[in-house]
């Protein structure tokens, strides 16, 4: 390498340095540290001591019924909300894309949940679903009005709590997906639709054979980020069910990590680290699978 | 299939706050396109030629007027029921499908009895691909093809349903110069082989002149002249058509007719029998000049360009509307040697070839005279 290009490289690295330092200190180092913690048995953060090194933390976490419940909850949440929210967002985006007047207004309306605070939304959901001494909540009012049995969605049966959580999550993640999908739809050159029209293509077939393939990169992007986001669910659950999630049986993996660190049962950084690494492994695997699938579809 | 346009008008609503008025893109157009012919719609950008194509295709509906395919009035039919094939300017090939899938796509849209079996579809796609000579590229994606190949795929896709009318929107504008000449021959060949009535839009007069049976010159939504290419070139109806056709373009002078003689500046250059005294525009085709030391038209030499078989003499004349007078003289003409070495600004004299000279009314710009052959 001659001197000039070496200098050029140095300048480049210098520009990158602040970002690299920041990423190194706050992202890479903690990641490595957590990985190390997860193998240190009985680590005490106050005295900075541990008994030994091994897989015990993992064995403990994987046998902990709270953790298993959290994994079950998280997977259920992911499996329900990612496809549903992406699908519904696609429907709404197609609808928004095809209407003329009020389009901008409705786009704003659909985007509002994105800028609304999670906890505030949680409050609204409480009002809608929670049973109190004075009221059964708006949704129960409707259910009984139609002759159904009133259900306690916040403290009641598991399926009721889970469905509220899913509904809530879908509602919260939808705006971003709609935003991305409407812009993806708008970026499809209208000439393809004209070509399809001249060829006598039905509306449905045009959507399936032309629109969908053309916006598929964006859909895959949303699915991948959707998976990651749903696996990291925590604040939404707290907004609905309070901080004692283990008691409510509604804990998530991130919630479990938090509880192990700071909750009532807190003070176990080793278990928390092991759980965090397990979550990392799950998310990493699923993202890889996603990328493989989407990469294969793209190349087709 | 004969295509007839009657009083066809298309108005677009004005866009934006400043421009509220309607825009008339096509104004009461009448046109009869004979069955099996190749017609070039020609005009500058914004003259409404693409709108006409879209009206024929049915992608746009006319404000007034009718469109007939043979005996059938198709004015209100949607595009897919008109039996047309349309090739878009940028081809509009579906990028995620292979060439084969692209060509099959229109066939797969057919329903009920019209829908051929899978084998028939493949056979038809194969035939269409052979016709445009891309049958070796069936499994490629459009992005893996050159511009010319994409163009062929687009034509194959438009032809696979055996349309009654083939419409091409600026078919050659995205190709480089060499490919353009090759592809226009190809379009001509395909049209001859299929005998499908074909309408294509272009702003390139050379393109239209070279392959069309009939050209239609348009300006601001109004048809200026319709005819065989050479006819229109040899006897343009008005100054616009004269200026639009021909490369290099026609030379225009301000002139006048006195006592049945045509004057450019103070020089009487041609007899103009039967024309009463008037101020006129004089159009002279570049090939209408002859270098001649005793010629009546004097110009001051600017430069000489030698390009292969042609020698262009570029000179100036006070009465010229264009900045320079461009004349093409044969390379064998012995005078060029002298001209090439001559100083800038020396006098050159031309005689004019009568049938390459047109006179246009100064006000209406309509042609009032053409020199005898």
Image (cartoon, rainbow, N blue to C red):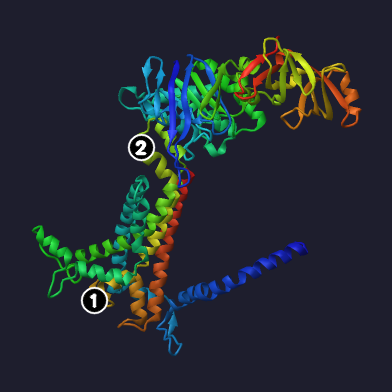
Out of B337 and A177, give the one closest to the viewer: B337
Q: Residue at x 50, y 30 (%)?
A: B50
Q: Residues within 10 Å of mark 2 (few under 14, many from 20)?
A: few
Measure the alpha-carbon separation of dots 1 and 2.
50 Å
Q: Secondary structure at mark 1?
A: helix
How would you rate the neighbour count of disc 1 (Cα within 10 Å): few for under 14, some for 14-19, many for 20 or more?
Answer: few
Residue B240 at what x, y percent from top left? Answer: 61, 25
The local secondary structure at tag 2 comes to helix
Tag 1 subunit: A
Nearer to us in this view, A143 or A62: A143
In the picture, measured across the screen, residue A101 lies left or right of residue A9, that is: left
Q: Which residue is mark 2?
A: A205
Q: Which residue is rendered at x = 45% and y = 78% of the image?
A: A37
**Camera-side residue of A220 and A49:** A220
Chain name for mark 2: A
Give a yes or no on whether discs 1 and 2 share a subunit.
yes
Regarding residue A148, the answer to whether it shows in the image is no
Decide which of B316, B84 is in the foreground and name it. B316
- Residue B156 can be seen in this image: yes
The x and y percentages for residue A223 are 39, 55
Q: Upstream in the sequence, badge 1 or badge 2?
A: 2
Q: Which mark is residue A247?
A: 1
Q: Is residue A107 rendered to the left or right of residue A162?
A: right
Picture disc at residue B332: none
| Vertical side of A30 occupied by A192: above or below | above
What percent of the width, then of the height, locates residue A18?
A: 59, 73
**Residue A246 placement, left or right of B70:** left
Looking at the image, residue B71 lies above or below residue A252:
above
């Amino acid at each position: 390498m001659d001197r000039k290009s070496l200098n050029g490289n140095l300048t480049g690295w210098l520009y990158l340095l602040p970002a690299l330092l920041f990423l190194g200190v706050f992202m890479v180092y903690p990641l490595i540290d957590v990985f190390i913690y997860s193998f240190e048995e009985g680590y005490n953060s106050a005295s900075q001591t541990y008994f030994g090194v091994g897989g015990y933390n993992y064995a403990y976490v994987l046998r902990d019924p709270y953790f298993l419940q959290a994994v079950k909850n998280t997977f259920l949440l992911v499996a329900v909300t990612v496809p549903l929210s992406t699908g519904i967002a696609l429907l709404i985006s197609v609808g928004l894309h095809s209407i003329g007047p009020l389009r901008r207004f409705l786009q704003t309306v659909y985007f509002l949940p994105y800028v609304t605070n999670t906890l505030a939304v949680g409050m609204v959901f409480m009002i809608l679903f929670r049973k109190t001494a004075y009221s059964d909540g708006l949704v129960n009012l409707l259910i009984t009005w139609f002759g159904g049995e009133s259900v306690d969605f916040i403290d009641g049966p598991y399926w009721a709590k889970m469905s509220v959580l899913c509904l809530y999550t879908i509602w919260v993640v939808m705006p971003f997906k709609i935003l991305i999908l409407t812009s993806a739809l708008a970026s499809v050159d209208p000439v393809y639709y004209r070509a399809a029209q001249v060829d006598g293509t039905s509306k449905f077939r045009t959507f399936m054979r032309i629109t969908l393939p053309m916006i598929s990169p964006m859909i895959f992007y949303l699915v991948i980020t959707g998976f990651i986001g749903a696996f990291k669910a925590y604040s939404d659950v707290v907004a609905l069910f309070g901080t004692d999630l283990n008691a409510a049986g509604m804990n998530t993996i991130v919630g479990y990590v938090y509880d192990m660190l700071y909750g009532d049962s807190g003070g176990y950084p080793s278990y928390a680290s092991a759980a965090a690494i397990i979550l990392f492994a799950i998310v990493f695997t699923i993202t890889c699978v996603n990328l493989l699938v989407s990469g294969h579809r793209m190349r087709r | 299939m004969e295509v007839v346009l009657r009083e066809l008008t298309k108005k677009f609503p004005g866009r934006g706050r400043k421009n509220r008025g309607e825009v008339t893109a096509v104004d009461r157009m009448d046109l009869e396109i004979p069955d099996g012919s190749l017609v070039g719609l020609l005009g500058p950008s914004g003259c409404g030629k693409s709108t006409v194509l879209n009206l024929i295709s049915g992608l746009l509906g006319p404000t007034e007027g009718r469109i007939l395919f043979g005996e059938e009035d198709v004015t209100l039919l949607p595009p897919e029921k008109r039996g047309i094939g349309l090739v878009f300017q940028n081809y509009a090939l579906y990028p995620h499908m292979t060439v084969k899938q692209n060509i099959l796509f229109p066939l797969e849209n057919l329903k009920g009895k019209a829908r051929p079996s899978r084998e028939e579809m493949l056979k038809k796609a194969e035939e269409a691909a052979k016709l445009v000579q891309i049958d070796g590229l069936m499994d490629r994606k459009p992005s893996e093809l050159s511009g010319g190949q994409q163009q062929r795929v687009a034509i194959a896709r438009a032809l696979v349903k055996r349309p009654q009318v083939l419409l091409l929107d600026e078919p050659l504008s995205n190709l480089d110069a060499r490919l353009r000449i090759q592809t226009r021959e190809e379009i001509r060949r395909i049209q001859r082989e299929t005998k499908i009535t074909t309408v294509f839009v272009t702003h390139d007069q050379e393109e239209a002149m070279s392959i069309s049976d009939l050209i239609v010159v348009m300006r601001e939504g109004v048809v200026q002249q319709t005819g065989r290419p050479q006819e229109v070139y040899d006897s343009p109806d008005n100054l616009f058509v004269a200026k639009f056709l021909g490369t290099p373009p026609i030379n225009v002078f301000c002139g006048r007719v006195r006592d049945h003689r045509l004057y450019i500046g103070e020089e009487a250059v041609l007899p103009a029998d039967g024309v009463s005294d008037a101020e006129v525009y004089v159009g002279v085709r570049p090939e209408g000049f002859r270098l001649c030391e005793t010629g009546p038209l004097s110009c001051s030499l600017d430069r000489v360009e030698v390009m292969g078989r042609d020698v262009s003499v570029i000179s100036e004349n006070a009465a010229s509307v264009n900045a320079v007078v461009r004349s093409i003289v044969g390379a064998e003409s012995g005078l060029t040697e002298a001209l090439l070495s001559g100083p800038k600004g020396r006098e050159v004299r031309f005689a004019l070839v009568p049938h390459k000279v047109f006179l246009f009314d100064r006000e209406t710009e309509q042609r009032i005279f053409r020199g005898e052959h």
